[in-house]
Image (tube, rainbow, N blue to C red):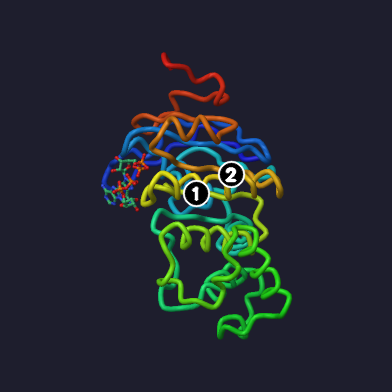
Amino acid sequence: MIEFKNVSLTYPNGHQGLKNVNLKLNDGEFIVVVGLSGAGKSTLIRSINQLVKPTEGELIIDGENTLNFKEKQLRQLRTKIGMIFQNYNLVKRTSVLKNVLSGRLGHTGTIRSLLGLYPQEDVKLALESLDRVGIVEKAYIRADQLSGGQQQRVSIARALTQKPKVILADEPVASLDPPTSHIVMKDLKKINREDNITTLVNLHFIDMAMEYADRIIGMRAGEVVFDGPASSVTEKT
Ligand code: ADP
Ligand code: ADP
């Protein structure tokens, strides 16, 4: 379980990213975070693996306040958290397979893997992960030759090779057209259900949030202003 206890985050320029956030995120939940641009969605998601670090409060994961973690513990934590970005963050001129294998980097941590020499079982896992998002036939193609939707599925496969407990998807479909967005959301949901991965996704569209989420968190000006099951969201909410 992930618990935010009175978490606030003020950026060095004085912008308030999070304001006194209290949340309990249960294992295996598929959570969609909604709100206008600047509401703090990205800050909320990125604080879980401390890409941005809260300035106040406690962020408890599996019973430990991760805000006290030293660098080594933080690195360990991050190996269990897959991250998906709006712009895929792939190494463009490298094969899909190598991109996916890079999800193993923090796990093996060996010099060999830094040089791109991965154990055979990692290659097998990477190919299986690509298969689960339906693009294993693209394994040996350069990443930048794929469409946006395919690139996002590569980044999901990369997260999968981490064998993550949590997936954080920060605006994963914001650069994609509606049909492709649904393919990506379906992949995220399928993986969430099959592997019981706690999943947080930022979205701009309430319709899509209601279609996929178990739970919707609404944000405004750094505060959580709505938190409930997708079924409780109505025209008036
Ligand atoms: P989004 O609304 O999708 O989060 P933004 O354009 O607000 O996108 O932010 C893009 C990137 O710029 C993010 O990495 C965010 O952390 C950073 N950013 C946003 N606002 C500021 C700011 N005022 N100063 C510095 N960096 C910012
Ligand atoms: P959202 O994801 O909902 O668009 P963000 O979490 O990106 O919102 O931003 C929340 C607030 O924090 C905004 O006022 C934004 O400008 C500010 N902000 C985000 N990232 C940074 C940053 N790196 N430096 C300074 N301010 C930031």
User: Is residue 213 left or right of 14 when viewed as pictured?
Assistant: right
Q: Mark 1 points at which residue?
A: 169
Q: Which amino acid does label 1 sit on?
A: Ala
User: Is residue 16 left or right of 173 when viewed as pictured?
Assistant: left
Residue 165 spot, x, y in % from top left: 66, 51
Q: Is 151 or 39 nearer to us in this picture?
A: 151
Closer to the N terminus: mark 2 or mark 1?
1
Q: Is 226 or 59 nearer to us in this picture?
A: 226
Whether the residues at callouts 2 and 1 have beta carbons within 8 Å, the answer is yes
Pick out the residue farthest to the right. 121
Q: Mark 2 points at which residue?
A: 199
Q: Which amino acid does label 2 sit on?
A: Thr
Where does the C terminus fall, quadrant-wise?
top left
Where does the N terminus fall, quadrant-wise?
top right
Callout 2 crowding tier (Cα within 10 Å): few <14, some 14–19, many ≥20: many
Residue 229 spot, x, y in % from top left: 57, 25
Instruction: Report ligand 2 position as a quadrant.
Output: top left
Label 1, secondary structure: give it: strand
